[in-house]
């Protein structure tokens, strides 16, 4: 299994062509870095079922059949592909039901008011997302990775006011693509809390998203805030209110978060078609990782 992990991640790293200049200077070679990253990720992986602590904010009740790669090793994986993670990044979830992966992070923006969900316009939100993504392409050019465009909704934004959970999904495409055959998807799920929000973003391919939507929702339902940190615990007299409302998690703010994850999704979709990998051996290979066999 160690060989599977190293080989799969190595395939993606080399197939993407090159690393950003800063990473290329640090690493002896893409191959050596990929092998080290895959080995470390496998060794650090925590298998479900277990409770994964997410700092002082919450916990993820990781179900059986899934693995959690902690921040340090997950960050190394992301950076090996030219991706950056923020301060609130906790790690990655992988599993035998996923062809992609789920990025888990907390944004301490404060209490996000959700009134605008009552009358938001999906078309306007989509245009905001497209505009915001276009504005971040300069950063991608600096990193030496392809520019990305948002194609359209895979699932228009839906907010459950009772559970304070938001779900939306957009398809992203490498601008150099002509036929759309390598469309990548970010399936974005959020849960709001007293001091900010958790996001669990599934990065996968358009071909796989329908079968993976239930998995993303299962994981979202398994994440909750600790006592005193929930949305209902908000104290208007003392607590910070976010500078933006719920719609920003689908518009401009979301575009920045979509950023390089969308680029990675494009890469993954492309190489799944070639049968080269299912992210670091954790798609079809995850059945071996979690002790399960392919159906006969």
Image (tube, rainbow, N blue to C red):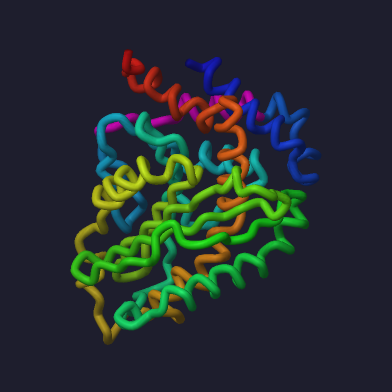
**In the figure, is residue 171 to the left or right of 63?**
right
Residue 204 appears in the figure? no
Does residue 136 lie above or below 292 as drawn?
below
Tell which of 20 and 182 is nearer to you: 182
Q: Residue at x 45, y 28 (%)?
A: 282
Image label count: 0
Q: Position of residue 53 (x, y in %)?
A: 32, 46
Which quarter of the figure has residue 189?
A: bottom left
| Residue situated furthest top in the rendering | 296
Which quarter of the rendered picture does the C terminus lie within? top left
Q: Residue at x 25, y 55 (%)?
A: 224
The prevailing secondary structure element of the residues shown in magenta is helix
Give the residues in magenta: 34-49
Does the magenta portion include 37?
A: yes
Does residue 139 lie above or below 223 as drawn?
below
Tell which of 291 and 155 is nearer to you: 155
**In the figure, is residue 181 to the left or right of 50?**
right
Residue 159 appears in the figure? yes
Q: Residue at x 41, y 79 (%)?
A: 121
Tell which of 242 and 168 is nearer to you: 168
Does the magenta portion include 213?
A: no
| Residue situated furthest front in the rendering | 179
Q: Position of residue 64 (x, y in %)?
A: 26, 31
Q: Residue at x 33, y 33 (%)?
A: 66
**In the figure, is residue 232 to the left or right of 125?**
left
Q: Position of residue 17 (x, y in %)?
A: 75, 36
Tell which of 197 and 200 is nearer to you: 200
């Amino acid at each position: 299994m160690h060989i599977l992990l190293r080989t799969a991640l190595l395939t993606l790293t080399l197939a993407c062509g090159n690393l950003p200049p800063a990473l290329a200077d640090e690493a002896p070679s893409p191959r050596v870095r990929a092998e080290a990253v895959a080995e470390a990720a496998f060794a650090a992986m925590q298998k479900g079922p277990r409770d994964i602590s997410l700092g002082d904010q919450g916990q993820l009740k990781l179900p059986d059949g899934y693995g959690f790669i902690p921040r340090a090793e997950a960050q190394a994986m992301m950076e090996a592909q030219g991706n950056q993670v923020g301060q609130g990044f906790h790690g990655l979830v992988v599993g035998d039901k996923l062809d992609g992966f789920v990025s888990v992070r907390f944004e301490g923006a404060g209490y996000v008011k959700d009134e605008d969900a009552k009358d938001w316009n999906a078309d306007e939100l989509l245009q905001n997302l497209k505009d915001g993504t276009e504005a971040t392409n300069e950063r991608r050019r600096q990193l030496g990775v392809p520019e990305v465009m948002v194609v359209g909704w895979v699932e228009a934004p839906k907010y459950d006011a009772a559970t304070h959970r938001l779900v939306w999904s957009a398809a992203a495409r490498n601008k150099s693509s002509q036929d759309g055959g390598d469309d990548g998807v970010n399936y974005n799920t959020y849960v709001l809390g007293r001091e900010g929000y958790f996001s669990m973003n599934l990065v996968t391919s358009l071909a796989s998203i329908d079968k993976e939507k239930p998995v993303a929702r299962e994981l979202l339902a398994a994440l909750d805030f600790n006592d005193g940190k929930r949305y209902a615990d908000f104290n208007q007299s003392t607590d910070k209110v976010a500078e933006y409302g719920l719609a920003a998690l689908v518009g401009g703010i979301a575009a920045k978060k979509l950023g390089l994850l969308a680029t990675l999704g494009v890469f993954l979709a492309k190489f799944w078609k070639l049968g080269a990998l299912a992210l670091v051996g954790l798609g079809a290979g995850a059945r071996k990782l979690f002790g399960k066999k392919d159906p006969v």
